[in-house]
Image (cartoon, helix red, strand yellow):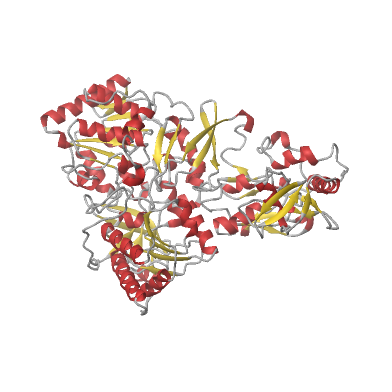
């Protein structure tokens, strides 16, 4: 530790720290614009000039390292004069448009100029003008004349997002920030540039000109999309969500937010919102009172349960629902005598049911991923499925960690990958078996050759090894075997093993017991052998299920489908009752993140129209059916009941026993590789217009290796017919030579591919 003095205050700080870091540690404010604690030091703005004893001139606090006995003065005459001089230069070309600037009221330049700016300008020449730029549907760069060239946005792209999409061109007064070759900014983390911009040069395009910062009410909330549990500040006005910003938490999302979490709110005000209960009579939809809709639903449930047995009733939910909603759903189903309840809609292998020792989770705190020195990531579209975890891993790799990938696609993770094995889905188990064998050999001091051996060697050389299973691996038809092998590899390395959770409440749904009982059917079985009644919670069956063909057929074969949804959707074709429920900003609830963190939140706005929180709807359904235990008055009462006697830490356990591991027989024909696109994961995101205008939301294509295209006599850009099961779709063919041969990559969870069958399996590709 080093002893220094700042403004007469004795401070101890670490060797290698800068004056700025030491001052912040001591609670002393030094004005700055280009410095940010998560970015590299640029020293562009010079606003942080301070006086250092014995130095001939003021020095920038952000770029000056501390030395033993240093004396620093942040408010001396010399320091303040330097800071005022810099501010005068910064304002020389700055436009006087604060009254119409979206950053007004939360602008760093505005705040600092109050303390360090002059009363009037000595500069009377023409100000320079920089033309606005179109860099995509999320970030507005219309007023680049405001830019002070702090390069925060450039450094964020390079250092955190992993791709330099913005850069600074030209010199002197001609210098300006621009995207390369007039392109757009397509990063899944691009919205953070808005937060980083200290002036009004980069602003939120969807929020532009909607409100001033002081008119907004702020409510704390939790991300309802990915499994991280990122903290949100939901900004509202006139009972409408107008903006979402991150709440800083170094243990979870640091100070960042993925674009999905930041801009999904636009889907809350979609024209497709379901705001009134509806029932279908004689094939026509009618809006009705809540009492009518609820009685219609309960009469149907009672009739089927009494006549054909409660086992003919099945409930499906998504893990984007709150803990309270999920808990009451399973309690309701068990109350009427049915064990058929499940949330694992995209899972295809249920062989570990009864063998799993607890709720599958990340296996460690999120922050521990940053400390790993060796990582093995199996079956994960990491960047798109888990943008903020990908950013953490990227930082770890920069510090010397080695990332190893086993997957069926070779997407650019924007970081150095030490070793990778890219194979067809049916070969994933075989590769993991080889890694496990090579690791055992490596531990005996011998060495093998090949991709698997390289991965094993990397893992064996680490001290803090982390093995993670992604969404693709969890949805795989041999998911149990992949889990057993990954667990084995982690044990051989004395490392940690975990699951990258798919949704906000993937862990919470297990703890709420939204899985079938001993005599119950899982999600796949409920759809393979159709039930007479389905109760759907936040489910869009044609987009949320592993086999949409089968899901739709099951819904159409049912006598009664009760859909609790925030939106009118494809369910209008097969449902009989639509009950409008409130999305996460309009209800209170709890999410349990992938690391097992229990976080509750309140509603930010009132529900739209006649919509009601789903837990209240389920409570009333329970009362109408005269079931015991449906007398809760608040969501907190439901949460307390759900968590009563539950030791979350004790319930989290990834271990499984008794899984027999064997390689799959080679598939004949083209194997389907399918991801759920980043902006197609849940109902709210699918309806966010800005997100649906991004490059990531482009219509799916049929991606094949160019050799496969040649074999089929096709060319990239041609229209092709994809057939699977009983359905077919037409897509454009595209070449990707990073794909293994024998596969076709076709996205799931998208309206354009909803007519196809299972996410895994063989498919036929031919000229349309």
In percent of width and height, residue 704 lies at 38, 64
Most foreground residue, 254 or 608: 254
Find the residue positioned furthest to the left: 307
Q: Residue 215 at x, y = what percent?
A: 61, 28
In the figure, is residue 39 to the left or right of 5? Answer: left
Q: Position of residue 308 (x, y in %)?
A: 11, 33
In the rendered image, the quadrant that contains the C terminus is bottom left
State which quadrant residue 675 falls in: bottom left
User: Residue 34, can we see it?
Assistant: no
Total marks shown come to 0
Q: Between 468 and 333, which is closer to the camera in this rendering?
A: 468
Q: Residue at x 25, y 33 (%)?
A: 331
**394 or 310: nearer the viewer:** 394
Q: Is residue 284 left or right of residue 382?
A: left
Residue 416 vs 289, above or below: the answer is: below
Name above or below for residue 579 compared with residue 425: above
| Residue in front for this viewpoint, 4 or 96 | 4
Q: Position of residue 232 (x, y in %)?
A: 51, 39
Quadrant location of the N terminus in the rendered image: bottom right
């Amino acid at each position: 530790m080093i002893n220094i003095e700042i403004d007469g205050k004795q401070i101890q700080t670490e060797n290698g720290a800068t004056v700025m870091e030491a001052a912040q540690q001591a609670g002393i404010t030094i004005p700055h614009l280009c410095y940010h604690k998560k970015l590299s030091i640029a020293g562009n703005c010079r606003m942080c000039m301070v006086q250092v004893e014995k130095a001939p001139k003021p020095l920038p606090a952000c770029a000056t390292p501390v030395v033993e006995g240093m004396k620093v003065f942040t408010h001396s005459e010399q320091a303040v004069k330097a800071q005022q001089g810099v501010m005068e230069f910064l304002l020389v070309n700055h436009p006087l448009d604060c009254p119409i600037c979206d950053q007004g009221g939360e602008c760093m330049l505005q705040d600092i100029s109050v303390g360090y700016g002059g009363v009037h300008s000595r500069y009377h020449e023409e100000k320079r003008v920089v033309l606005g730029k179109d860099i995509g549907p999320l970030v507005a760069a219309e007023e680049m004349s405001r830019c002070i060239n702090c390069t925060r946005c450039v450094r964020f792209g390079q250092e955190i997002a992993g791709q330099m999409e913005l850069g600074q061109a030209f010199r002197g007064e001609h210098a300006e920030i621009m995207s390369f070759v007039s392109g757009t900014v397509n990063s899944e983390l691009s919205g953070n540039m808005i937060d980083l911009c200290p002036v009004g040069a980069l602003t939120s395009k969807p929020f532009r000109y909607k409100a001033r910062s002081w008119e907004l009410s702020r409510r704390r909330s939790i991300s309802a999309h990915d499994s991280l549990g990122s903290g949100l500040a939901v900004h509202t006005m006139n009972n409408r969500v107008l903006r979402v910003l991150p709440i800083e938490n170094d243990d979870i999302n640091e100070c960042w937010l993925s674009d999905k979490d930041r801009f999904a709110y636009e889907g809350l005000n979609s024209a497709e919102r379901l705001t009134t209960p509806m029932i279908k009579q004689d094939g026509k939809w009618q809006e009705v009172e809540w009492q009518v809709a609820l009685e219609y639903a309960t009469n149907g449930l009672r009739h089927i349960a009494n006549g054909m047995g409660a086992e003919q009733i099945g409930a499906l939910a998504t893990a984007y629902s709150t803990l309270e909603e999920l808990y009451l759903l399973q309690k309701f189903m068990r109350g009427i005598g049915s064990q058929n309840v499940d949330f694992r809609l995209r899972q295809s292998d249920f062989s570990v049911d009864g063998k799993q020792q607890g709720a599958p989770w990340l296996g460690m705190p999120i922050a521990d991923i940053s400390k790993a020195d060796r990582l093995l990531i199996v079956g994960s579209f990491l960047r798109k499925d888990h943008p903020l975890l990908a950013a953490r891993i990227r930082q770890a790799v920069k510090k010397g960690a080695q990332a190893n990938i086993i997957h069926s696609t070779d997407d650019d993770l924007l970081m150095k990958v030490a070793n990778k094995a890219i194979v067809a889905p049916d070969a994933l188990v075989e590769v993991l078996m080889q890694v496990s064998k090579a690791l055992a050999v490596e531990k005996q001091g011998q060495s093998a050759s090949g991709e698997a051996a390289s991965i094993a060697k990397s893992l064996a050389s680490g001290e803090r090894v982390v093995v993670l299973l992604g969404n693709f691996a969890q949805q795989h038809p041999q998911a149990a075997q992949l889990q057993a092998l990954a667990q084995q590899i982690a044990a051989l390395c004395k490392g940690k093993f975990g699951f990258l959770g798919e949704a906000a409440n993937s862990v919470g749904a297990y703890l709420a017991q939204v899985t079938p009982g001993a005599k119950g059917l899982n999600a796949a079985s409920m759809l393979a052998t159709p039930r007479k009644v389905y109760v759907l919670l936040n489910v869009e069956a044609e987009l949320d299920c592993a086999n949409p063909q089968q899901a739709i057929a099951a819904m159409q074969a049912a006598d009664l489908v009760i859909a609790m949804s925030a939106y009118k959707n494809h369910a209008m074709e097969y449902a009989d009752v639509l009950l409008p429920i409130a999305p996460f900003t309009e209800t209170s609830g709890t999410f349990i993140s992938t690391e097992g963190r229990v976080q509750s939140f309140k509603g930010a706005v009132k529900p739209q129209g006649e919509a009601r929180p789903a837990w209240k709807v389920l409570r009333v359904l329970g009362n109408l059916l005269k079931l015991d235990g449906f007398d809760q008055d608040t969501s907190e009462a439901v949460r307390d009941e759900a968590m009563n006697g539950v030791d979350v830490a004790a319930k989290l356990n990834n271990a499984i026993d008794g899984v027999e591991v064997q390689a799959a027989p080679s598939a004949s024909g083209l194997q389907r590789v399918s991801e759920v696109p980043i902006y197609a994961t849940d109902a709210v995101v699918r309806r966010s217009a800005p997100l649906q205008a991004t490059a990531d939301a482009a219509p799916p294509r049929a991606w094949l290796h160019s050799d496969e295209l040649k074999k089929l006599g096709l060319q990239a850009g041609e229209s092709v017919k994809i057939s699977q099961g009983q359905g077919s779709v037409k897509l454009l063919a595209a070449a990707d030579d990073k794909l293994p041969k024998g596969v076709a990559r076709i996205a799931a969870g998208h309206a354009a591919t909803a007519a196809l069958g299972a996410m895994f399996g063989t498919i036929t590709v031919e000229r349309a």
